[in-house]
Image (cartoon, rainbow, N blue to C red):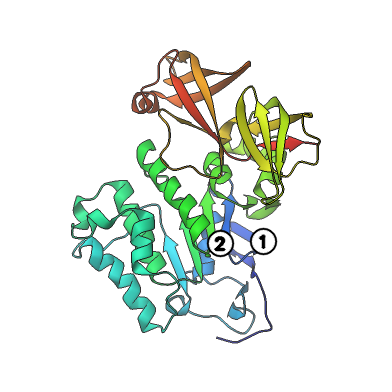
Amino acid sequence: MNKMLKNKQIDVAFKGSIGDFRLDIEFQMPLNGITALFGPSGCGKTTILRCLAGLHQMPGKVIVENEIWQNDQIFIKTHKRSVGYIFQEANLFSHLTVQQNLLYGAKRARLHNLKETFHYNDVIELLGINHLLNRSTLSLSGGERQRVAIGRAILAQPRLLLMDEPLSALDQNSKEGILACFQRLHNEFSLPILYVSHDIKEVSLLSDRIIALEEGKKIKEGITKEILPSLSNNRLSKSIGEAINKIDIIASVKEHDSNHHMTILDFQGQEIILPWINEKQGKEVTLSFLTDSISIIHGHPEIRSSANMLIAYVENIELDPKSKISEISLNLGTKFIKLKTTQRQLNVLSLKKNTQVFLLIANIFHNK
């Protein structure tokens, strides 16, 4: 691969057509953290991943730090690109055990003389799959299969990890387990991840940056917590068929943590921790979050994420007999929040009136 001057990011641009669909996009992403490609079905998210992996050739450029994967003169083939690709369905080798699947990724890395950045024991521990090593992949649940697929991809020592809606085929319990793994992966491994989703809750919980797409074009790009509020009034939210509702609450500045550049706020006796807010102690401020960034957890979660967690109570549950969708009314102090959910999720969470729940809220914003 051709070497370039030092470039501390990944530069991507594609412009071309596949049948009647036209893609015209350019973006940059950092060398660590999670960048989300967000938008409705058919907007080009998966096409971008396939082009990045070299599975589809479209005019453009891909420059990963100091390596050219593609430009006007060069096109590096898929097997020579240091990419890990996680699909909606885990593509494991059914004739191999879990451990053998994982070691296949490590073998591929050695074959291409890649530096061992991600160590076997660390990956196994992070994904919580040590008890699965000797099992056949045919005996695994959907969530377990996806964890193994992620482990195999990481042990191939990729420069870039591509994830194409990896939670879409999982039930709610499996999703929550994988989300916790992703959050640990984000915090503990320095690895750039491009994450495709049309689920705004996943995006708000996981990503640092977001690239919002519609009809093959970029319509918004930037830091997730800054971009998501602007999407609530954008036609993108309507095209997905979701109403992105904003909740405002009043909290007071409790104290500042100068060592970590954080501010601790008090909301009716509960703490909220945000990046530094330049307001005096005791000052009341307005905070906002999107209802679609809320995850309901019945019982205290074992793994804390970077999201804030607040205690609420189920005030009421109403079932729409036509859609079979239930509306949950939650009492958060003096604030009432309404969320929609399926009967299956209600059963999984064992929710009923007066139940205490924990609300995991990603990306609470300070309204300056």
Q: Residues within 10 Å of mark 1 (few under 14, many from 20)?
A: some
Percent x, y of residue 221: 69, 53
Find out whether the residues at labels 1 and 2 contact each other: C-beta distance under 8 Å: yes
Q: Amino acid at mark 1?
A: Ile
Where residue 105 sits, quadrant-wise, is bottom left
- The CA span between labels 1 and 2 is 9 Å
Q: Amino acid at mark 2?
A: Ile
- According to the image, label 2 marks what residue? 48
Image coordinates of residue 32 in percent, x first then y, are 58, 63
Q: How many residues crowd around disc 2 within 10 Å: few (fewer than 14), some, or many (20 or more)?
A: many
Residue 313 located left or right of residue 6: left
Q: Is residue 293 above or below residue 342?
A: below
Give the image location of residue 142, x and y in percent.
30, 47
Numbered tag placed on residue 25 in the rendering: 1
Q: Residue at x 57, y 59 (%)?
A: 33
Q: Is residue 17 above or below residue 63?
A: above
